[in-house]
Amino acid sequence: MACRLANSAFLTTGPHQNPIKRQRIGTHYSSGICYLRLDGALRKGIKRQQCSSRRNWTAVVQAVAVPVAPPPEAGSAEYRKQLAESYGFKQIGEPLPDNVTLKDVVETLPKKVFEIDDVKAWKSVLISATSYALGLFMISKAPWYLLPLAWAWTGTAVTGFFVIGHDCAHKSFSKNKLLEDIVGTLAFLPLIYPYEPWRFKHDRHHAKTNMLVEDTAWQPVSKDEFDSSAIFRQAIIYGYGPLRPWMSIAHWMIVHFNLNMFRPSELKRVKISLACVFAFMGIGWPLIVYKAGILGWIKFWLMPFLGYHFWMSTFTMVHHTAPHIPFKTADEWNAAQAQLNGTVHCDYPGWIETLCHDINVHIPHHISPRIPSYNLRAAHKSLQENWGKYMNEATWNWRLMKTILTVCHVYDKEENYVAFDKLAPGIESHPIKFLKKAMPDYA
């Protein structure tokens, strides 16, 4: 049993009660047994050591051994509990056994969670349309000092349009597939997001979740990329550090407008989506500028657009990024572990959950993308009942974000991630060091 010294010593002197110099006491641990070291000699347990001075005074030294729990064993429930607290999680799930398949998990879900309900689907459209219209009204009437609140609301409301298009892409919005493609395309237009290019890349994300190189969302930085050049390294440090909540803008620009990134069989649908987006930009943007000027374009479109991308970046990185969640190579990858163990359920404030149609009830969505957004909570409850001990759960908080922004950087097979400031401890990593000091640690 491990122990510590509670009271280091008390001294008793001879008849004159003159003080004498205390003898030094240390501790030694071996095979779970605590030892006390007194003048270099090891003595088990609690010992009294009598020493004689030149004047025959006697010094009595007493130490008390107090039991202390040993550190939790890696992989134990207590270890995961401590890890969860340090990362800002409510729960870190235990590893899913290798013999569990994704089909095993899907088969435990009730059939009703896969059912499409047209009334609920169009109710979500009504919620997004009215909340977005309300946001635009608030922007038009708000004094300058309340504009950030109006932009936050409107950016969150337009994120709801993205979730509707997201359901259409997964064929979970309507039984009419042509209608799904039309609604999905229209829902993405205010975001200048081409629907089909996004759908093709997003399907790959679901098929290859947390697979190294293959996943299309939030790959860890490779060591080769980090070492490639000083300029690129600095851009990566800022991009995966303080600018990370808006990095989906770079992904949007680089991935979805480049025809070379799509298969020949996909190009026709990709071009149709791009034509719709460019038409919206060519008509919508000039109308906004004509009616409200350049500042009006910034107020009514750009700022809500940035608000949407804040949520797009934040939601997607929280869904699959944490120090304990690994990216694995194709030969080591396991679908059930990636989707159940490698996805995070995160609770956000109620108004965000409502406007964003429960997209952050995300584990059931990765177990089966065919579950409509309005059935995700029922599916999550079923997963908790059957697979709860394997699930990662959190409430959105500062510590969670701080962990992601300051730790989850460069891929490492053993540790999952190595932070930038460990690989480049000098001035290059100042943005990460700044975040560590500036961001609160509340969970």
Image (cartoon, rainbow, N blue to C red):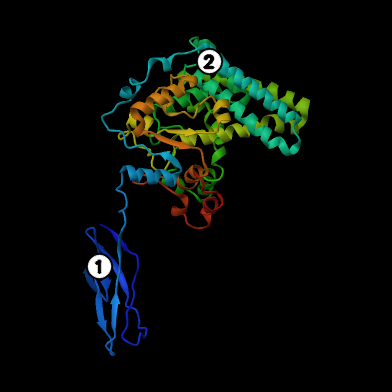
Residue 412 occupies quadrant: top left
> What's the residue at 47%, 23% (across, down)?
200
Query: In the image, residue 306 lies at what x, y percent?
Result: 62, 34
> What's the residue at 51%, 24% (across, down)?
197
Closer mark to the observer between disc 2 and disc 1: 1
Residue on which the image places disc 2: 120
Residue on which the image places disc 1: 46
Circles 2 and 1: CB atoms closer than 8 Å:
no
Query: In the image, residue 50 lies at what x, y percent?
Result: 25, 79
Q: Please name whichever residue, 367 or 303, is drawn nearer the observer in this view of the structure.
A: 367
Query: In the image, residue 228 lies at what x, y percent?
Result: 46, 47
Residue 291 occupies quadrant: top right
Residue 95's place in the image compared with 273, above or below, is below
Residue type, mark 2 in image: Lys
Q: On the picture, is 41 further left or further right than 124?
A: left
Secondary element under disc 2, as helix, strand or loop, is helix
Q: Please name whichever residue, 293 or 64, is drawn nearer the observer in this view of the structure.
A: 64
Q: On the picture, is 100 further left or further right than 184?
A: left
Secondary element under disc 1, as helix, strand or loop, is loop
Look at the image and tell me in which quarter the N terminus lies.
Answer: bottom left
Q: CA distance from mark 2 to mark 1?
A: 71 Å
Query: In the image, residue 195 lies at what x, y percent?
Result: 54, 22
Residue type, mark 1 in image: Ile
Q: On the picture, is 271 further left or further right than 294?
A: left
Name the residue furthest bottom. 55
